[in-house]
Amino acid sequence: MKDETIICRCEDVTWGEIRQALEKGYTTLNEIKRITRAGMGRCQGKTCQSILLREIAKYCNKKIEEVDVTTFRPPTKPVKLGTLAGDNDD
Amino acid sequence: MMIKKADIVIIGGGIQGCSIAYNLAKKGAKNIILLEKNTLASGATGRCGAGIRQQFGTKMNCILARESIKIFENLSQELEYDIELNQGGYLILAYTEKEVNQFKKNIALEQSLNIKARFITVEEAKEIVPPLNTEGILAATFCPTDGHANPFKTNFAYAEAAERLGVKIYTFTEVKEIETENHKIVAVNTDKGKVLTPIVVNAAGGYSGIIGKMVGVDIPVYSQRHQILITEPVNPLFRPMLMSFSRNFYCQQTPHGSIIMGFGDPNERKDGDIGSSWQFAQEMAQKMTAVLPLLKEVSMVRQWAGLYNVSPDAQPILGEHPQIGGFFMALGFSGHGFMLAPITSKLIAELILKERTSLPIDKLDIGRFERGELIHEPSVV
């Protein structure tokens, strides 16, 4: 994979940034998320998490199922604060 | 493999533990190890609101925060890592006469300590934050040098700088037991093996009470859940952290564009649970869309929670335990651990190395609760 390849489309995180974090020794999804913001955008990792798990597994010589996923955080999809607040305008 | 013997063992890989490790190593201390049961920044630091303010109601907190900001201002250079410091100020809103009076006292105190905070009118507040709904606001205070930094990056920056100076960091290593002999620390047992050490630093944040029990002492702190939510990134809307004690909220747009917000619920769980509740999201949305109506159109993308480690007077407990030689504490920060860490870590390092501390912190010892010398902080969310 090229360094310029975008892994997290919401937060514009490239493979180069992920590779650097891995090479520094940050080999958990939680650490990579915290350092690069991968998975913290609008889709909350629905696109990039599977790619990240695959690449972490490959880098660490592990099976994908041996790599811990991050905690699921609500909501499942973005919700307008006005809707949450009970605004009836929508 | 874990080493068998250390001069100093630090428990906790959050901002406290990592900054203490760095400051000790910077002063030339050797054989330091740091133990973290999960990953670095996995506890309160990685869950915090990231704010840094100097506007407090006690002299102690004002001085600590002022000195901390001075360190923050050069920290990216010092640690060779961009910690994304952004000094957009803190705008604290007064909604009640009682708050107006308290804020006048706070500002007099802050100005006497050379903190650049000032008392401002509602009109000035509206100029600083144009989307602000001023309904019910009587006055405000503003300190332009307050702000925030990236807590993850600050945490990793301290950890990596500490490692470059020889500190050994063991993640996924949980402390199970601490051995003492004649009221002195002798060893730490972990799930990865035993380390002999004369000094332990309890920087375990929300878990610091559990560490205290391992040496048989009762630390008067409790850990309470605090929840936060964050929105999608949007164009810049306002710069400072917006805060109110009586309406109970804080809210800030990060340089990245997302808006982070939280409040302290006195009825929140104290059982260690760090899940999220929909009730929080709903109440938070109601509070903030009332203050900043344009937020109605902005979407929340994530919510989470972390633990405040709260002391009886909402100020940290710093220093060696009087009954257990070599047992140092940096805990009970009551929600202000991230912002105070740069200075408190330096002070703790000085204490451990038996140097004269650069600020007097003897009044923050654990003994103050028995002596009845609490220094209660009135300005807390």
Image (cartoon, rainbow, N blue to C red):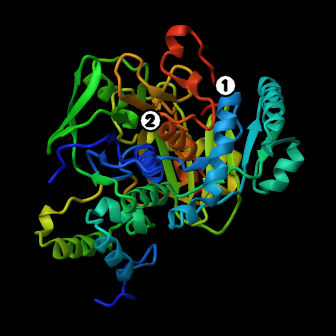
Image-quadrant location for residue B96 = top right
In the picture of the structure, the residue carrying the numbered disc 1 is B378
Mark 2 crowdedness (10 Å alpha carbons): few <14, some 14-19, many ≥20: many
Q: Amino acid at mark 1?
A: Pro
SS assignment at label 1: loop
Quadrant for the N terminus of chain B, please: bottom left
Question: Mark 1 falls within which chain?
Answer: B
Q: Amino acid at mark 2?
A: Ile
Please name the residue shown 41% across and 65% down the image.
A35
Mark 1 vs mark 2: give the one in front: 2
Q: Is residue B91 above or below residue B324?
A: below
Judge by depth and name the residue closer to the eye, B277 or B333: B333
| In contact (CB < 8 Å): disc 1 and disc 2 | no
Res B352 label: 2
Question: Mark 2 falls within which chain?
Answer: B
Q: Is residue A36 above or below residue B32?
A: below
Would residue B53 be visible to someone looking at this image?
no
Question: Residues at marks 1 and 2, common chain?
Answer: yes
Q: Is residue B128 above or below residue A54?
A: above
Image-quadrant location for residue A13 = bottom left
Q: Is B255 left or right of B227, judged from the image as shown?
A: right
Would residue A24 be visible to someone looking at this image?
yes
Q: Position of residue B78 (x, y in %)?
A: 55, 62
Judge by depth and name the residue closer to the eye, B172 or B292: B172
